[in-house]
Amino acid sequence: MKYLLRSLISLPVIISIFTLQSLHAEKDLYSKVAPSCLEILVNGRLDGSGVICNKKGLVITAFHVVKKRQKIIEALSKTLGRLPLRLIATNRGSDLALFSLPEKKNAYPALSLANDIPIEGTDVFLMGSPIFRHHLLLKGCIARRTETYSWYDGSFKNTFPIAGIAAPGSSGGPWVNSKGEIIAIQVAGVTTDFGHQGVNSAVGGISLKSFLENKETVIVPTIQSAVEELWGQSTRLISDMPKEVKGLLFRQVSPHGVCAKAGIKDEDIMLKADNLVYERIEPFVKYIRSRKIGEEIKFLISNSNGENEKMVSVKLAELK
């Protein structure tokens, strides 16, 4: 009985110690991350977030934040002030843009890149300025480490999912681990007509690492159309398809793009691409990315009822 009483009495003390340690760790993380994080101004407007990733002032953000044609890009920081940014390189297939801050004698505060993405279920943290709320540290967790392709802003981007809520304005901000190391850059959220669905798309891994190491613009090919998996379609559309049909469905075919010029329409079925059958998005987009701009892809297509089969050729365009 004495042992039991002693355990119960000591329990609140143990909880209090762990609570204080947790709060102290979170405070330290914010203090470590915040000085290296920036707000990105486009023509004077706060349009996104970014992070300094080396002491010379290299800054990475999401490409879609800065893609306006007529623009002045600046960084805004509580400690550094308002500074001009010079474009170094872009990777539109990963939705990344690399900039440099003005040279200076003293080193810039910077965050280093993590060696890998944490395992699924691990807490991670996003630093950004969503909807003009300055420098917020938001919590999420790794939903899956393997890459997929997210369709938004008119093209596929290679991303992986992080659970959590990230509002507009946080794009380009860094996801960091508990050590304050960059594991990914926030680029998009999964939304429906009912709002954000608690899943974010981020770019990390080899895509982020190689871009930071090479500091060169990456050009990727595109068919200027989305594709969707057949089992993700409406019940009506699925019921109209032949049961034995396999392939992908064309969606959001750009009106003046290479697919449209070849006669491909929304809801046409891709039965084969260069004599190969694809039922999932990832291997198909990887195949397209492995080819060169200007090369031709031969598609065997039909309408959504599986009728009017025909072979068409599509010349790969540059993703812009």
Image (tube, grey):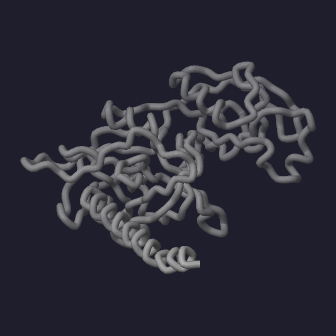
Please tell me which residue lies in front, 253 or 119: 119
Relative vertical location of residue 93 with respect to residue 276 in this rendering, above or below: below
Picture residue at 42% right of the left edge, 61% below the top: 170
> How many circles with numbers are drawn on the protein?
0
x then y, percent, for residue 153: 53, 50
User: Image quadrant of residue 244?
Assistant: top right
Please tell me which residue lies in front, 303 or 21: 21
x then y, percent, for residue 5: 54, 80
**Does any portion of residue 106 appear in the rendered image?**
yes
Relative vertical location of residue 289 with respect to residue 159 in this rendering, above or below: above
Quadrant of image for the N terminus: bottom right
Name the residue furthest front.
2
Q: Is residue 228 left or right of residue 157?
A: right
x then y, percent, for residue 260: 66, 37
Relative vertical location of residue 4 with respect to residue 285 in this rendering, above or below: below
**Does any portion of residue 43 appear in the rendered image?**
no
Picture residue at 59% right of the left edge, 65% below the top: 196
User: Image quadrant of residue 126?
Assistant: bottom left
Please tell me which residue lies in front, 133 or 6: 6
Picture residue at 33% right of the left edge, 61% below the top: 29
Name the residue furthest left.
105
Picture residue at 55% right of the left edge, 43% below the top: 145
x then y, percent, for residue 201: 53, 51
User: Image quadrant of residue 114?
Assistant: top left
